[in-house]
Every structure is written in structure tokens, then in C-alpha cells.
């Protein structure tokens, strides 16, 4: 399982929606803050198995560790334009990387 996390308002949901619909982009996508869990499935190539991505809302960061079991890859999303959020993003990432359940997970 691939886990997509990051601070609130970084565009995780929009990114996953766009990745899932690469063949038919929709510029009218709107999102609301994720409170809970979203699951997205992305099909790369027809002969390859689909990728299931579990997205956790940024407001849920205190309970992210309860979702770490079985995670093989981590997608950490940061809004680099939001300079006031970079400090929080750094602290969340350091906690994520230091967690024992994610020792073998790859970051993408």
C-alpha cells in the first residue's frame, strides 16, 4: 500500500485525482479538506497492476501512525509556495521518517 500524507491544504486530494485521470484531465476539479481517509486507484500501464493509494487528511496527523501497518511507500506532499507552512511540513516529515513501522518504506 502507498500512503499519501502531508500538512493540511497541500493539495493531496487534487494531486491524486489528477493522477487518476491523466487521460482525461478535468480542470474543474474542486476539493474540500480531507477529514478522514480517501482511497485512490491509479492505473499506470494496462499490463501493470493498479496502484492503491491511501490518503490521510493533514488534520489527522496525530493519528497517522495507526495507518502505518503494511505501508511500503510514502508520498509526502508539500505546498512549496506556502512558506508559513514549511516549518510544520518539516516537523511532520521528520516524525514520519523516524517512525519504526516505516523503517523499510520508500519515500517518493
Image: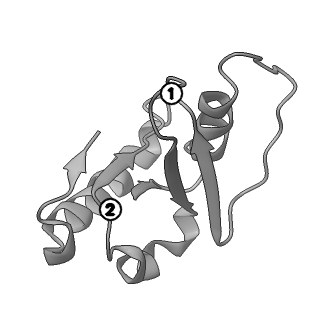
Q: Disc 2 and disc 1: Cα gap in Å?
A: 29 Å
* Closer-to-camera residue (99/84): 99
- What quarter of the picture does the N terminus occupy? bottom left
* Closer-to-camera residue (80/6): 6
* Number of numbered discs: 2
Image quadrant in which you'd find residue 18:
top right
Residue occupying image coordinates x 48% and y 55%? 7
Residue 92: mark in rendering: 2
As drawn, is 101 to the left or to the right of 45? Answer: left
Residue occupying image coordinates x 51% and y 52%? 53
Residue 63 percent location from the top left of the image: 45, 82
Quickly name the residue at label 1.
44
- What quarter of the picture does the C terminus occupy? top left
Q: Is residue 20 above or below residue 25?
A: below
Residue occupying image coordinates x 48% and y 28%? 81
Q: Residue furthest right?
A: 28
Q: How is the image coloured?
A: one colour
Image quadrant in which you'd find residue 80:
top left
**Mark 1 surroundings within 10 Å by alpha-carbon count, few (fewer than 14), some (14 through 19), many (20 or more):** few
Amino acid at each position: 500500500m502507498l500512503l499519501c500524507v502531508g500538512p493540511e491544504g497541500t493539495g493531496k486530494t487534487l494531486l491524486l485525482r489528477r493522477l487518476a485521470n491523466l487521460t482525461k484531465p478535468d480542470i474543474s476539479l474542486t476539493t474540500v479538506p480531507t477529514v478522514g481517509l480517501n482511497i485512490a486507484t491509479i492505473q499506470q500501464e494496462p499490463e501493470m497492476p493498479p496502484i492503491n493509494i491511501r490518503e490521510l487528511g493533514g488534520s489527522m496527523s496525530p493519528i497517522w501512525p495507526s495507518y502505518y501497518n503494511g505501508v511500503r511507500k510514502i508520498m509526502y506532499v508539500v505546498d512549496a509556495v506556502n512558506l508559513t507552512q514549511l516549518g510544520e511540513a518539516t516537523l511532520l516529515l521528520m516524525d514520519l521518517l523516524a517512525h519504526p513501522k516505516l523503517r523499510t518504506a520508500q519515500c517518493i
